[in-house]
């Protein structure tokens, strides 16, 4: 089955409380980049590991985007003002796409 992550998008309460809207949008945009990298072969489960590093005035958010089948990963770094350290899943069940914290799975 081919997963396109083009269904209606939802976020859980945990995501809404943990990630600012701009980070949520960025993670959804990362799906398009991974789609291009894997020539359209996206796994139904996309995994994002987010970790903040740096000092108070110069924090960076490191994002590791992974999938198992076919195996692929991408890394991103962006400035942030808040501390974010979590694992996020984006799941495509064909009808809709859900972003959730790993502990909400």
Image (cartoon, rainbow, N blue to C red):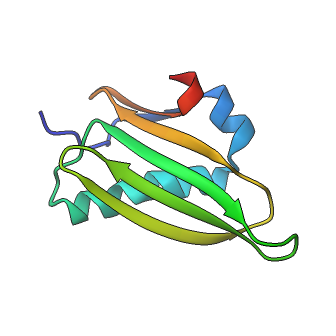
Is the residue 27 above or below the residue 100 in the image?
Answer: below
x, y (%) of residue 50? Answer: 59, 53
Going by the picture, which residue comes out furthest to the left? Answer: 1
Tell me where residue 96 sits by quadrant. Answer: top left
Q: Residue at x 16, y 50 (%)?
A: 41
Q: Residue furthest bottom?
A: 58
Q: Residue furthest top?
A: 105
Left or right: where 57 falls relative to 72: right
Coordinates of residue 14 in the picture (x, y in percent) = 67, 30
Quadrant containing the N terminus in the rendered view: top left
Q: How many marks?
A: 0
| Residue 44 picture location, percent across and down | 28, 35
Horizontal side of 55 relative to 85 (left or right) equals right
Left or right of 39? Residue 78 is right
* Front in this rendered view, residue 102 or 95: 102
Residue 15, located in which quarter of the rendered image? top right
Q: Tell me the residue at 18%/49% (across/down).
A: 70
Residue drawn at 53 percent across, 60 percent down: 63
Q: Is residue 57 above or below residue 8?
A: below
Rendered location of residue 9, percent (x, y): 45, 36
Q: Residue at x 71, y 66 (%)?
A: 53
Q: Nearer the viewer, residue 78 or 66?
A: 66
């Amino acid at each position: 089955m081919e997963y396109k992550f083009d269904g209606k998008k939802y976020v859980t309460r945990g995501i809404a409380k943990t990630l600012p809207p701009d980070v949520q949008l960025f993670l959804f945009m990362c799906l398009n980049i991974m789609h291009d990298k894997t020539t359209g072969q996206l796994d139904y489960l996309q995994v994002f590991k987010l970790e903040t590093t740096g000092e108070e005035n110069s924090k960076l958010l490191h994002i590791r985007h992974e999938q198992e089948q076919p195996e692929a990963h991408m890394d991103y770094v962006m400035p942030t003002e808040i501390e974010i350290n979590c694992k996020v899943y984006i799941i495509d069940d064909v009808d809709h796409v859900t972003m959730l914290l790993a502990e909400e799975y």
